[in-house]
Image (tube, coloured by chain):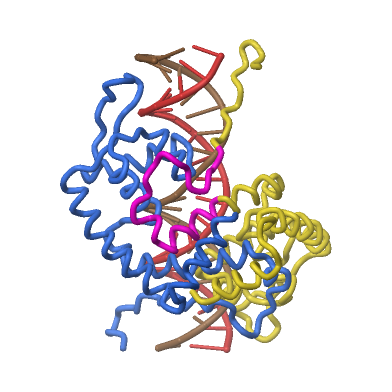
Chain colours: A yellow, B blue, C red, D brown
Amino acid sequence: MSVEGQAEPEKQAAFEQWPDGVSFGVLRDLIGYALRRAQIAIYRDFFATVGADGITPPLFAALVLISENPGINQSRLGEVLGVNRAAAKALVDRLAEPKLVERQASPSDRRANTIRLTPVGQARLDDLIRQVQAHDARVARRLVPEDLALLRDLLGRF
Amino acid sequence: MSVEGQAEPEKQAAFEQWPDGVSFGVLRDLIGYALRRAQIAIYRDFFATVGADGITPPLFAALVLISENPGINQSRLGEVLGVNRAAAKALVDRLAEPKLVERQASPSDRRANTIRLTPVGQARLDDLIRQVQAHDARVARRLVPEDLALLRDLLGRF
DNA sequence: TATTGTTATACTCTATAACTATA
DNA sequence: TATAGTTATAGAGTATAACAATA
């Protein structure tokens, strides 16, 4: 029921994995496209769960990697995440702005920064990890542990 | 060997699936992150194969769906692809500009456009399908058919 | 009232290219 | 020469919000 004079916010259409009544042609046979559709479904759940904090999947991954590898530099962080230096800098900027991470001059290489979490960042990450784990368990709820192990193995072959 | 006065274009660092020497912490256990890494690897191969034509994975998917469902309207196309109306319009615009698809007024609903491939678009898609199938087979080269069937089933459960 | 398409706007993600400082 | 970080720029992808036309 809409309040007079106020439009309802438009609801996002549900994402059906393979809707009926439409032909997918060759897309049905492409494993890359099956992966893409699964990813869309997972991202939607991620944003519904974690997104309110402004943390996106790439930012979450960066936070975890910085936490696990304190003192890592930006270029290496980018390599590990699969993005270039400029993109890695953008990620670190977005985490540094709210003071979740900080840059320090590297003692051994005056070109490089070392990146590490602040105490606030670590506390925040601890919370985020709980949220993301709940999200991950929810999207994988139809997979038993053996399925998950198998899936992990198969995905590792790309 | 660089020519004097000309810098080499910077090479993109290779994307190792799970590089050694760095700790992934909780990321190692999140199935959503395993999916994300597989997707990064697949996208890189897609762009190396097909990207020169300016066709991206979402545009390719839209082309196939329009081909398979001629006369589909933009809103429905968006629903099927998992994007909203505005994003669906942007995709159709990008395909209509080089005349791969065309909009026609719907005879039954004067609000709606029907979208279909042009002959040029269909010929182009036929070529693209060949390229994308080769790409898909290449990225899945370490998976036997039974693995692929299994993977498809597992991905369908998200 | 609800839906289709459109427009305006904004943000994330990512790349390329060129520059500075160091190595 | 090569590498780390930075800056400027650009483009893809996507969302929200509001509007007009039509259902």
Picture quadrant where residue A131 is located: bottom right
| Left or right of A125 in this view: B104 | left
Q: Please indicate, yes or no, whether residue A158 appears anywhere in the rendered image.
A: yes
Q: Residue furthest front?
A: B146
Q: Nearer the viewer, residue B149 or B135?
A: B149
Is residue A39 located in the magenta-colored stretch of the structure? yes
Picture quadrant where residue B135 is located: bottom left
Residue A38 position (above or below residue C9)? below
Residue A71 position (above or below residue A2)? below
Picture quadrant where residue A113 is located: bottom right
Quarter in which the N terminus of chain B is drawn: bottom left
Per the rendered image, the range of residues in magenta is A14-40
Q: Position of residue B88 (x, y in %)?
A: 41, 39
Q: Nearer the viewer, residue A33 or A148?
A: A148
Q: Please indicate, yes or no, whether residue A65 appears anywhere in the rendered image.
A: no
Q: Position of residue B118 (x, y in %)?
A: 19, 42
Residue B65 position (above or below residue A13)? below
Quarter in which the C terminus of chain B is drawn: bottom right
Q: Position of residue B134 (x, y in %)?
A: 31, 69
| Left or right of A135 in this view: B20 | left
Q: Position of residue B114 (x, y in %)?
A: 29, 31
Q: Residue furthest top?
A: A4
Q: Residue at x 57, y 62 (%)?
A: B154
Q: Residue furthest left?
A: B119
Is residue A153 located in the magenta-colored stretch of the structure? no
| Left or right of D16 in this view: B6 | left
Q: Residue at x 48, y 42 (%)?
A: B83
